[in-house]
Image (cartoon, helix red, strand yellow):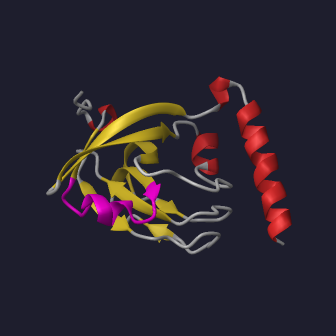
């Protein structure tokens, strides 16, 4: 079983490495402002429906200070799941003004349990499991990024 998972992981890594750059999510940064300070996160932006559907599936790791942003054109109820996602994640649900609405910590890998925003949000930020607690991300924290009408400060 472990060998099969390793082969699948290798095959998928080779597949995604071979994708043309236009097929890969755009790289960017955002800043999260918490009681403990400002934290810069290197992100991939899942702009297309294909990017959103794939998300972080089949990845075997996501380093500290890295994440994926799922932006939506307007505030809406958002539902996520962990199907084919091999690593635990923290999901940060963000309102249109950049305020953190809700945080779901340590999501269960490979689960089909629905994880809901529980309110209208304009984006979801996925981080490595434990990052929300480590950085102090709680409802009311602020996220600066052009998607929320606030550019990231250098």
The image quadrant where one finds the C terminus is top left
Which residue is rendered at x = 18% and y = 59% of the image?
A: 140
Residue 71 at x, y = what percent? 43, 43
Task: For residue 103, say whether it is visible.
Answer: yes
Q: How many marks?
A: 0
* Apparent side of residue 47 relative to residue 33 in the rendered image (left or right): right
The image quadrant where one finds the N terminus is bottom right
Q: Is residue 133 above or below residue 32?
A: below
Q: Is residue 45 above or below residue 134?
A: above
| Residue furthest left in the image | 35
Q: Is residue 151 above or below residue 131?
A: above
* Apparent side of residue 18 relative to residue 91 in the rendered image (left or right): right
Residue nearest the observer in this picture, 98 or 39: 39
Residue 131 falls within the magenta-colored stretch: yes
Residue 118 at x, y = what percent? 36, 68
* Apparent side of residue 57 relative to residue 73 in the rendered image (left or right): right
Which residue is rendered at x = 28% and y = 58% of the image?
A: 135
Which residue is rendered at x = 24% and y = 61% of the image?
A: 136
The quadrant holding residue 93 is bottom left
* Apparent side of residue 3 relative to residue 149 in the rendered image (left or right): right
Which residue is rendered at x = 62% and y = 73% of the image?
A: 111
Task: For residue 119, say whether it is visible.
Answer: no
The quadrant holding residue 121 is bottom left
Q: Which residues are magenta?
A: 127-141
Residue 127 at x, y = what percent? 44, 55
Residue nearest the observer in this picture, 71 or 126: 126
Residue 10 at x, y = what percent? 79, 49
Residue nearest the observer in this picture, 85 or 122: 85
Residue 128 falls within the magenta-colored stretch: yes
């Amino acid at each position: 079983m472990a060998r099969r998972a390793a082969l699948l992981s290798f095959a998928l890594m080779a597949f995604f490495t071979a994708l043309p750059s236009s097929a890969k999510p755009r790289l960017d940064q955002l800043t999260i402002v918490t009681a403990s300070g400002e934290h810069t996160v290197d992100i991939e932006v899942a702009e297309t429906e294909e990017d959103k559907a794939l998300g972080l599936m089949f990845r075997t790791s996501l380093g500290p200070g890295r994440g994926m942003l799922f932006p939506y054109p307007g505030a809406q109820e958002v539902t996520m799941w962990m199907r084919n996602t091999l690593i635990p994640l923290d999901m940060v649900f963000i309102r249109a003004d950049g305020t953190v609405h809700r945080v779901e910590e340590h999501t269960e890998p490979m689960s089909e349990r629905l994880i809901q925003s529980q309110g209208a949000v304009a984006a979801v930020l996925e981080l490595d499991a434990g990052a929300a607690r480590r950085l102090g991300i709680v409802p009311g924290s602020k996220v600066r990024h052009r998607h929320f009408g606030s550019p990231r400060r250098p």
